[in-house]
Image (spheres, coloured by chain):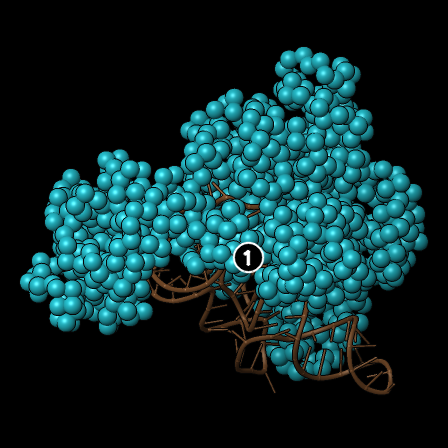
Amino acid sequence: MDFRAIEEKWQKKWKEARIFEANPEESKPKFYLTVAYPYPNMPQHIGHARTYTLTDVYARYKRMRGYNVLFPMAFHYTGTPILAQSKRLQSGDKELIEQFKSLGVPEEVITTFTSPISIAKYFHEDLKLGMQEMGYSIDWRREFTTIDPAYNKFIEWQFYKLREKNYITKGSHPIGWCPSCKNPVGQHDTKGDAEPEIGEFISIKFIFEDKYLPAATLRPETIFGVTNIWINPEVEYAEVLINGEKVIVSESSIEKLKHQFSNVVLIKKIKGSSLIGKYVINPMDGRKVPILPAEFVDPNNATGVVMSVPAHAPYDFLAIRDLQSHSESLKKYGLDSSILSSLTPITIIRTPELSRIPAQEIIEKLGVKNQMDPKAEEATKELYLKEFNNGEMLPNTGEYAGMLVNRAREEIKRHLLESNKAFKFYEVINGPIYCRCGSKIIVNVLGDQWFINYGNREWKDLARECLSQMNIIPDEMRKEFENIIDWLREKACARRAGLGTPLPWDRNWIIESLSDSTIYMAYYTIARIINEEKIEASLLTPEVFDYVFLGKGNPSSLNKETLEKMRKEFLYFYPLDSRHSGRDLVPNHLTFFIFNHVAIFPKELWPKQIVVNGSVLMEGRKMSKSLGNIIPLRKALRTYGADTLRVAILSSSELLQDADFSDSLARSIKSKLQEFYNFALEYSKAPPIDKNYLDQVDRWMLSRVQRLISQVTLAMESLRVREAIHLVLFILMQDLQWYLKRKNSDNAKSVVKYTMEVAIKLLAPFAPHLCEELWEAYGHKSFISMESWPTLDESLVDDKAEAIEGFIKSVIEDSSEIIKVTGISPSRIYYYVAPNWKWNAYIKMIQLLEEGVDVKMLLREAMKDQEIRSKGSMAAKFLNSISQLIITMPKDRRKQILSIGPLNEIETLNNNRAFLENYFKCEVKIISADLAEYDPKNKAEQAIPLRPAIYIE
RNA sequence: GCGGGGGUCGCCAAGUCAGGUCAAAGGCGCAAGGCUUAGGACCUUGUGGCGUAGGCCUUCGUGGGUUCAAAUCCCACCCCCCGCACCA
């Protein structure tokens, strides 16, 4: 069979019949779902396919459940990575060219990639084709990109709304910056794709003559423990004027300061050594401390001025010790050795497991030799964490005494900044990081950055309210959403470069990509009309959106009819029933999605559900450019076919887990589908079931099918797709195999056909092409995609038939076990069936247990029964032997036995004797245990209800 | 650190919320048999240990506890992965 041909055939038919185009139909319930639209900067790979396939499966399922399903798609052009890529290609970046080539982009196409729009357009098409080839049931009439003028108008409207609510703020904001490109840098702009991490140092202004020496620290709370200042004597320093104040900093920090303060002027350069031996005043407590030399001081880190806290900083402790042991360096700077006596460590923090001088203890523990020992770094980190987490400020810290370190740090920082005794200094802390142009990344503070204030209290409350009403699948993620709503603060919502919508009131800024993609689900509902009627963007005024989405006002730019159509379509499909994305978008997009909806729309239009899925691994490893293990989706499509890919991606793990894709997985799924297909075809011509001729085994099979339907349906409702696939492809097929082993009549063909027809429907959301093909082969004229989902037929549920089949299976199992262990090749098998009184006792015990009799009292209670007691010690022995069995029996099974009552085992086994004899290739005898005349090994007394005693010879 | 997810019989992975059909689904791998000129594919069986009677013993990150009964509930601890933002 040719998967690809089948797929093309049905994709064409779907398209021609336009079955996935959804319009409002007032008489039909709607189901509206969307998935995060893709960013078209590289070919789609199988990792992307998971989220989209899951969404499509859900869409198809809901469609079969009778909903008018809308599943639209668009493309997110907004952002800077595409821009960065085109720049790299402009400069002939070989690495990127190779990467594109390896992902199958033709060379002549790559040459057009010097324009960012060409990149977006090319991959847009690639992504779209991939989605179509995967068979996604998307309504393509609603497609748009985020740089379409009409969409820009929509985003402008959204931002006006946010500003009206006072959710937009302005402030300063530090970002990674390339001083030669004069541009912000993100991960995609740096060599090695390193994300610059920005750390906030507090530069405490120690008073030095008429100037300041700003010591940069991450631990401002240690200000009380300062014994001296460290300067690197080998380094150039400089006196500069910052906002009218004279400060001394390392020369190499000046450039950085200029990007963080508006007014930085160099006065003169100074040798580091010239500062040594002078004194400064601690602005916090007024103590006078000396300036001393230390070679560990890095002029490239922050201000190049370091305050020394020997009790709590291993480097400082070591540097002082080094100084003490090298008196010649003291002399070199004309220092009197008496100065060292003033350098006694001042302990200001107490931490449970640390001694009086914590830095010293850590140094000794780790065996750090001196200030240049790499282990000093490790010691610093360890102490930093310990004190931060468990430390408490000692009495010598004034008003901060008794405070926990993490709190004191915030308080002291605030005090220092507010009283102008310190300033913030941002530094790239995981540096050096280089821009692709070669320059070192520094921090730039933008003074007029626009933010969306997700920190707003009332807004958070609304978001929480929305979340609490929403269905979150899987529910484990709910807690994470709650936490994220709590954490969110201001989010910089615009940037200087990239594709996107200009901020309407300040067009020097482009609205950033996570901010222009929060409520576009609403836009899809009218995108169809905008596309079909080719509505000019200029006509889409804020008043139009106010009317369409909020029902407010009376806009004049569009005619009434169009406006009403839009309003109607929006109100029909909104609120959104289900939003899908990978779990990586939980802390940003999905949460912003909630926030923006509650900000703009009335409660009745808030989204109802979020579905989150894990990512896809390739052969157990993360897919990445560097590993070169990214498989473009369209390439995989050609290798395996759409149905195989769909099933493989969704069947390898449950929702939240990472799915592990591999060639062997795809192959095995492919052969499984093939098997399913061939098997189903064999029965396509069978006649319908004649219900008058159903035997016990038929009824069992039909009953199993009913159970399958309800199990699969339940799984689909909460998107446990792995389970659903598993039930249909494995469990059901197992049952069918058993069924066919048991049966050999024509009637069986009809039962199998019925079963497969159900199975084809249940599998249709996952492997739609294959199932359409089979559906057609089964003689149906309709699309299975539009067929109704199977429902449980109560009249076919047959507990007794299932119990009997279970009984036969367990008899076979037990017999096989004995044959295996003894190594006998049987010539005759005897089954001694439990007599009535045992059944009665058995049922009595179950009844008692179900009535709530304590397990410990069970035996005693059962012995109260007249009939049981009449059997005397035999009964006691029997009860004892079955009590464990009954106690450990699951509740469902107990209920089942009670409802069915005693099973006529003799009759049942006799009915199946031919089967058993054939199975074991020997004679089978069935006897009631109390009538056993031939019982050479005294097995008969072991008989238990549903477990006949067995003797094999 | 904070927050989230996870640790199950060679590997992957269900089971955990609602304790008992759990020596624990399924897939892969492996082994034996069938099929085949051979290989592949396919089918059957087996795959913790012991066992000439359907059984017994040990096991679900570690250590305690609750219970007639714990992979599942409670407590403590160890380890792995991810996020902590301006980036799609």
Q: Is residue A286 left or right of residue A530?
A: left
Chain under numbered label 1: A
Check disc 1: other Cα within 10 Å, few if <14, some if 14-19, many if 20+.
many
Q: Which residue is mark 1?
A: A436
Give the position of the N terminus of chain A as an image quadrant: bottom right
Compared to residue A782, the image places residue A190 above or below, namely below
Kindly tell me whether residue A449 is visible in this rendering: yes
Q: Nearer the viewer, residue A787 or A712?
A: A787
Count of numbered marks:
1
Residue A511 location, x and y as percent?
57, 35
Q: Is residue A791 left or right of residue A476?
A: right
Compared to residue A403, the image places residue A362 above or below, namely below
Q: Is residue A924 left or right of residue A332?
A: right
Q: Is residue A793 left or right of residue B16?
A: right
Colour seen for chain A = cyan
Compared to residue A573, the image places residue A754 above or below, namely below
Q: Amino acid at mark 1?
A: Arg
Q: Nearer the viewer, residue A757 or A659?
A: A659
Give the position of the C terminus of chain A as an image quadrant: bottom right
Q: What residue is rendered at 64% in x and 65% in y?
A: A628
Q: What residue is rendered at 85% in x and 43% in y?
A: A14
Residue B33 location, x and y as percent?
76, 83
Q: Nearer the viewer, residue A770 or B64?
A: A770
The brown-coloured chain is labelled B
Q: What residue is rendered at 52% in x and 25% in y?
A: A163
